Image (cartoon, rainbow, N blue to C red):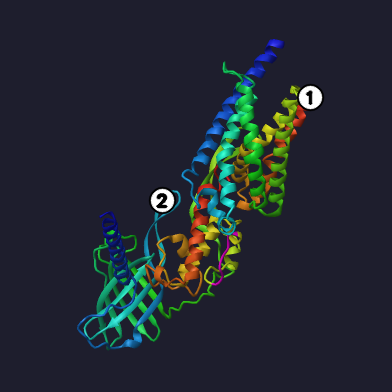
Amino acid sequence: MKILKLTLISLFTIGLVSCKKEAKTTDSSKDSLTAKKDSVVVPEIYKEYYGIYMGDFAGKGMIISEDGEEYEGEIYKKIALKINRITKDSVYGQSIVDGNQRPFRGVFNEEIKSFVLDEPGNDKTDGRFEVKLNNDSLTGNWSAFKKSAVKAPSKTLKLIKKEFVYNPNFMLDENSELIDWENPKDFVEKYTDEETGKTETYTASKNRIASDAVFKLNASKQKLTEKDLKNLRKLDMEIIKNSVFARHGYAFKKQTYRNFFEQTDWYIPVSNNVDNDLSPMEKENVALLNRFIKYAEDKYDSFGR
Amino acid sequence: MLLVKKNISNLLKILLIIGFGYFFWLMLKITLEYIPLKREVSFLMIKQTEVGQRQEYLYFFYTHVYTSIFVLLSGFLAILRKDFGLKNFHKNAGKVYILLILFLAAPSGIYMGIFANGGIYSKISFVILGCLWWFSTFKAYQLARQKKFKEHKQWMWRSFALTVSAITLRMWKVIIVYLFHPNPMDVYQIIAWMGWIPNIILIEYIITKKYI
């Protein structure tokens, strides 16, 4: 009786686990930018225009400066538009800004080669693209549906067609700026006035800087060892780890990583989930790096080893 | 004048006891991270090469972790040289301290020293530390057996100064990281030596000045 019970329980668990897996796969296919196939076959036209268009996304908006003052300035961002499908009356695709991936649907005007594309409208950053195709470049503008909800309600786009390819050799460029501007740490420092002898304290903020280890260690090409990582700081390991995801076209949600990888000419964000694309070695390296990043976070400056 | 001196030394004693209590508490918290016993936790997170390649590593590691906290406690209780109304308390606390070090904590410490982080410089330091720790404790034990209590006391202070390196090493780490933010293994190479050398110098100074 007991054995029967156990068997039932284990079978049930296996059942649950497999269900979970299935759910995950459907989920990830929804996430990735691959075109969804409709059951009814609609003839696709202009397949040559399919692809990723990447470039600048700029507009005037209110910027809050460090001392809290608001002023109007130019806000620059990177955008990727992916055209997945063009049929006689519809265009399907996605836009990615700041790691935020939004689907769009619209129409293509064959005569003037221009698109009008609408994001769904249930996100405050959604809006309408009106862009014109000229060989490999796609230019035009975007306007937000809710003008008051965004910093820059109308923006211009200057995009160029890019081919996404995975290449394990891609690294950060050796001339890259390695400062992480997004996570400043405040330090209290003392200053003694020599004349009056008064001591004042002030807070200075310092930014993290990566070392050139990020140009040398490639977690997509070599099996990393503990020895390779032991003397690295957290930021180095975070970059080495996220280089793997960048190569697979992961659209980073964190500004820190966008800042590093947008400096390269190879980084093209195409997906919100690349977990299944990683090679077994990359997965092992990422697991190792995660362990070391956790250790650095918990132990680097604390009482302990 | 004598009264003032006595008061100061009493105050110093109380401060040292409170200080030890605080750091013992921190050490206890570190030890508790390893309960229940796991293969991959805390310090072991960056020691998986050794854990994977050497079957015996975890045995030595956990021997060291689980005995050392009692070494700290028994050593501290014994060095107070009070019986607190219990018969032979000092003697028994000392016995626990000596047995734990000679048979468990020091040998496992020396073994771990051979595979220490930070390369050859820290390895050398930890192995020397382990050997001196064993030797000073053994010497103190012998002298107690021979009833040479003055020298027993001096050697016990040497032994305890090395025991306390567990605490001073971690204190130096916090200070050095706070001041200079070096890379983790650069800190490690420094604290490997700073953890125990100043301690032993201080004790030798106190012994030559005949305070102990």
Which residue lies most toward the right here? Answer: B208
Is B186 on the left-hand or right-hand side of A29? right
The mark found on residue A69 in the picture is: 2
Tell me the magenta residue range.
A221-226
Is A59 on the left-hand or right-hand side of A223? left
Residue B1 visible in the picture: no
- Report the front residue among B36 and B99: B99
Q: Within 10 angstroms of label 1, few (less than 14), some, or many (20 or more) residues?
A: few
Residue A89 visible in the picture: yes
The overriding secondary structure of the stretch rendered in magenta is loop
Q: Position of residue B141 (x, y in %)?
A: 71, 30
Q: Within 10 angstroms of label 2, few (less than 14), some, or many (20 or more) residues?
A: few
Labels 1, 2: one chain: no
The secondary structure type at the circle numbered 2 is loop
- Report the front residue among B167 and B128: B128
Is A104 on the left-hand or right-hand side of B88? left
Cα distance in 3D space between marks 1 and 2:
65 Å
Q: Which residue is mark 1?
A: B209
Label 1 chain ID: B
Looking at the rendered structure, the kind of residue marked 1 is Lys
Q: Position of residue B13 (x, y in %)?
A: 63, 22
Whether residue A212 is in magenta: the answer is: no
The secondary structure type at the circle numbered 1 is loop
Please tell me which residue is depicted at 38% across the width and 65% down the height of the picture: A99
Q: Quadrant of the N terminus of chain A?
A: bottom left
